[in-house]
Amino acid sequence: MTICKTYNKGPKAAANSANCDLYEKLFDLIFSKDLIILVRWMPLHLKQGDELSVGVSLPDVIANGHADRLAKEAAASVQLSHANTSQYMHYSRLVSRLQKRLATILLYIPTRKTVRREEGA
């Protein structure tokens, strides 16, 4: 739903989003082709034969199915291999374990009194 709201607020609002680079490309393409695009929220993963919500038509469901398929294909095309990610995942888990251990140690270290030294001492 956030993507829908961000898109419908326009390019200025999209420029302040986490995906501003993608929105910039999208709006540039839309403006260069002089397109009019309506983006609206739809219930997730409806299939032909499901009960339709108010305002959702069968062509909407079919188009959403195509969008889901294309999104899966796009995600698969940039999927990283296990060989490329295994070391990253190993060290990421190691850092997480070390951070948790350090946090635990810091919680249980007794508070020390600060002793001030006098100048010239």
Image (spheres, rainbow, N blue to C red):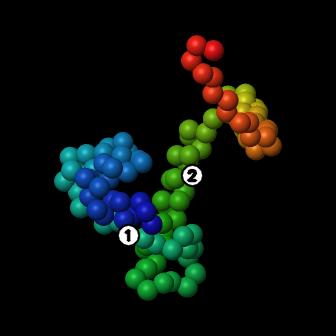
Residue placed at 58% from the left, 13% from the top?
120
Measure how far apart labels 2 and 1 are at the Cα level.
20 Å
Q: Which residue is mark 2?
A: 72
* Residue 45 x, y percent position in the rendering: 57, 69
**Residue nearest the observer in this picture, 94 or 32:** 94
Crowding at dot 1, Cα within 10 Å, few <14 / some 14-19 / many 20+, comes out as few
* Residue 8 x, y percent position in the rendering: 30, 64
Crowding at dot 2, Cα within 10 Å, few <14 / some 14-19 / many 20+, comes out as few
* Residue 103 x, y percent position in the rendering: 73, 41
- Establish if 43 lies above or below 17: below
* Residue 26 x, y percent position in the rendering: 32, 49
Residue placed at 48% from the left, 69% from the top?
62
Q: Which residue is mark 1?
A: 40
**Extreme residue in the top direction:** 120
**Residue nearest the observer in this picture, 68 or 16:** 16
For residue 47, side relative to residue 28 (left or right): right
**Residue nearest the observer in this picture, 95 or 111:** 111
Q: Amino acid at mark 2?
A: Lys
Q: Is residue 16 visible?
A: yes
- Secondary structure at numbered mark 1: loop
Q: Amino acid at mark 1?
A: Arg
Between discs 2 and 1, the one toward the N terminus: 1
Q: Choose top left, top right, bottom left or bottom right for residue 89.
A: top right
**Residue nearest the observer in this picture, 30 or 97:** 97
The quadrant of the rendering that contains the N terminus is: bottom left
Residue placed at 50% from the left, 83% from the top?
52
Q: Which mark is residue 27?
A: none
For residue 26, side relative to residue 66 (left or right): left
Q: Is residue 106 visible?
A: no
- Secondary structure at numbered mark 2: helix
